[in-house]
Amino acid sequence: MARLTVFFGLMLILSCGTICSSALTTFSLEDKLQELEIRLEAKIEAKNAQLEEKNELRQDLAFKIIQLEAKNDQLEVKIGKLEAKVEQQDSLLTSLLREKNERTAAASTDSVRPIGNNQSPVAINGLPSSCGDLALIGHTLSGIYSVMGSAKMESVFCDFTKLPDDAGFQKWIGYADVKSAPVHFYVQRNSSFSDEFTPIPFQLALCMAECKFTHLWEK
């Protein structure tokens, strides 16, 4: 009887130990699973945070790329305008240089005139009356000049590329004081004139010989 009691006691102890061990084992697995789950969630959150950060960086880079492309387009437009201005300036400079060279060549051509053997300019008495006088006092450029005629100033064209005896050296143009358009004068007499509302005829007022309004002052 005593042995049977001891046997049942041992069995009860073994059963309690097995149950306690199973409970402890189950509790330990649940803790580990929960711990693993917590760690996994933490890693997932960390990865999500990294992904969000990378997405923000990617968006910033995309925005900067768009800005750089816009600036690049603006720079290309400015470069195109600058190139157009440079081409325009080059064209203008080329035109000015060509015109300058043409003027220099024309001046060199006009200045070549064989009047005597390297004759130096000389002084003359009075006003020059011909292209020859102009050449003597040092004029070398061909063109229109005013010279003193027999009664009044005359306009002549002088071609200093020719000799004074050559045909075309001097070409008479006209009188320097001849007007090509009508000129109106307002004059008054200094003596009485009895006819009222009667104009003085131009032919009577003007002295054709002297080209002066002399008759208006006759008393």
Image (cartoon, rainbow, N blue to C red):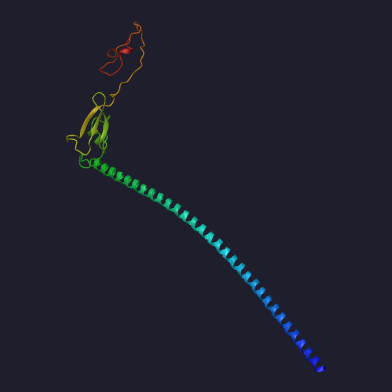
State left or right for residue 35 relative to residue 1: left
Dividing the image into 4 quarters, which one contains the C terminus?
Answer: top left
Give the total number of marks visible in the rendering. Answer: 0
Dividing the image into 4 quarters, which one contains the N terminus?
Answer: bottom right
Q: Residue at x 60, y 68 (%)?
A: 44
Name of the residue lying farthest toward the right: 2
Q: Quadrant of residue 53?
A: bottom right
Q: Is residue 175 above or below residue 29?
A: above
State left or right for residue 190 relative to residue 104: right
Q: Position of residue 189 (x, y in %)?
A: 35, 12
Q: Nearer the viewer, residue 97 or 10?
A: 10
Q: Quadrant of residue 137?
A: top left
Q: Nearer the viewer, residue 32 or 143?
A: 32
Q: Quadrant of residue 211?
A: top left
Q: Is residue 62 above or below residue 190?
A: below
Name of the residue lying farthest toward the front: 1
Q: Is residue 201 above or below residue 132?
A: above
Q: Position of residue 215 (x, y in %)?
A: 30, 13
Q: Nearer the viewer, residue 177 or 202?
A: 202
State left or right for residue 33 relative to residue 185: right
Q: Nearer the viewer, residue 126 or 176?
A: 176
Q: Position of residue 59 (x, y in %)?
A: 53, 59
Q: Position of residue 27 (x, y in %)?
A: 70, 77
Q: Residue at x 64, y 74 (%)?
A: 36
